[in-house]
Image (spheres, grey):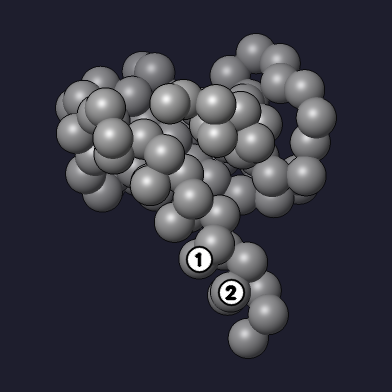
């Protein structure tokens, strides 16, 4: 039960932050598709890039990390979007 709750909180936070300025849909390969162009997979610090490997513009949003690198973005940074 606990793991499912954490997953839901992460994805809800990301969705709520991004929906203010962007059109968000579900992605056929990942968690979210924004503006029909950017694919986002949301997870914990151990989340891999497997689900977005076929995405032209795919990003992994990780919780429990302080800094990003490459196409990996810390979840907390989405709290600064507005």
* Residue at horizontal 19 percent and vertical 27 percent from the top: 36
In the rendered image, residue 3, in percent from the top left (x then y), is placed at 66, 74
Q: Quadrant of the N terminus?
A: bottom right
- Name the quarter where the C terminus is drawn: top left
Q: Classify residue 80 by image quadrant.
A: top right
Bin the neighbour count of mark 1 within 10 Å (Cα to Cα): few under 14, some 14-19, many 20 and up.
some
Q: In this rendering, does residue 80 appear at all?
A: yes
Tell whether 17 sits left or right of 33.
Answer: right
**Label 2: how many Cα within 10 Å (few below 14, some 14–19, many 20+):** few
Q: Residue at x 69, y 50 (%)?
A: 44
Please tell me whether mark 2 sits on a helix, a strand or a loop: helix
Task: Identify which residue is drawn at 78% across, 44% down.
Answer: 64
Residue sitting at the far top: 70
Q: Are marks 1 and 2 in contact (CB under 8 Å)?
A: yes
Residue 54 image point, x, y percent: 40, 29
Residue 57 is labelled as: none
Residue 58 lies in quadrant: top left
Question: Which of the numbered marks, if any, corresponds to residue 5?
Answer: 2
Report whether residue 54 is seen. Answer: no
Give the Cα distance between marks 1 and 2: 5 Å
Q: Secondary structure at mark 1?
A: helix
Q: Which residue is mark 1?
A: 8
Q: Is residue 8 left or right of residue 49?
A: left
Residue name at image x 71 percent, y 21 percent: 68
> Which residue is the extreme one toward the bottom?
1
In the depicted structure, whether residue 67 falls above or below residue 32: above
Total label count? 2
Image quadrant assignment for residue 10: bottom right
């Amino acid at each position: 039960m606990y793991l499912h709750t954490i997953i839901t909180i992460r994805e809800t936070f990301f969705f709520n932050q991004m929906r203010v300025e962007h059109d968000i849909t579900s992605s056929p390969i990942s968690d979210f598709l924004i503006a029909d162009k950017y694919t986002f997979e949301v997870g914990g610090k151990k989340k891999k890039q497997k689900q977005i490997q076929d995405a032209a513009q795919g990003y992994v949003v990780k919780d429990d990390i302080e800094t990003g690198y490459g196409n990996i973005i810390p979840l907390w940074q989405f709290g600064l979007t507005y």
